[in-house]
Structure formats: structure tokens, C-alpha cells
Image (cartoon, rainbow, N blue to C red):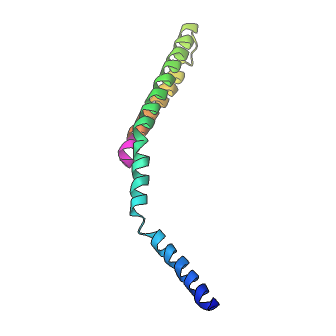
Amino acid sequence: MKKRVLFSAVLLLSMLGVFAQGNGMQGITDATNMVTSYFDPATKLIYAIGAVVGLIGGVKVYSKFSSGDPDTSKTAASWFGACIFLIVAATILRSFFL
């Protein structure tokens, strides 16, 4: 009698594991939808960060230009490059993953 109960319990537990696994397609679809739903806000956030960095860079370049610093063009190029990188990176990531 004990063997029969033990066998039934083991069989029941193994069947629950089989039913719980499924094919996983719904989980993958849900995860994909969740990740892609974050791209629009993240892209807008990166654009906003680029705008703030651009404004700060503009003020920094203006202050260097006003003081007569000979290093103005290098500073302007580095800040401009950083802003372009942020914008291009956000656009490429969005087009690559969506």
C-alpha cells in the first residue's frame, strides 16, 4: 500500500512539472513586448540628455571664446562630437532593436 501511494505521489509531481513547462512562447513574447515598450521613453531620455549636454557645452565654449582661450576649437569639437554621438547612438539602437 505504501509503495502504491509513494508511486502515485511521484507520478503526480512529475506530471505537474511536465504541465508547467509548456513551450515558453508566451513568456518570450511578453518579454519582447516589455523590452520594446521601453525604447520610446529611453530614446527621448537620451535626446534630452544630449540637449542638456549641448547647452552646457555651448556655455563652456562661449566662456572660453570670451576669455580668449586658444583651446576653444578643440573644446567645441569635443562637445559637438559628444552630442552627435548621443543622437546617433539612440537612433541606431532604436533601428537595430525595433
Judged from this view, the residue extending furthest toward the top is: 66
Tell how many labels: 0
Position of residue 21 measured from the top left corner of the image (x, y, whole percent) = 47, 70
Whether residue 49 is situated above or below residue 32 in the rendered picture: above
Position of residue 25 measured from the top left corner of the image (x, y, whole percent) = 39, 63
Horizontal relation, residue 96 to residue 49: left or right: left
Q: Residue at x 53, y 16 (%)?
A: 61
Q: Residue at x 38, y 38 (%)?
A: 91
Q: Is residue 35 magenta?
A: no
Q: Is residue 96 magenta?
A: yes
Q: Residue at x 52, y 27 (%)?
A: 78
Of 55 and 43, which appears nearest the observer? 43
Q: Residue at x 49, y 78 (%)?
A: 15
Whether residue 65 is situated above or below residue 93 in the rendered picture: above
Position of residue 94 measured from the top left corner of the image (x, y, whole percent) = 38, 42
Give the magenta-colored segment's residue range.
Answer: 92-98
Position of residue 29 measured from the top left corner of the image (x, y, whole percent) = 38, 56
Of 13 and 5, which appears nearest the observer? 5
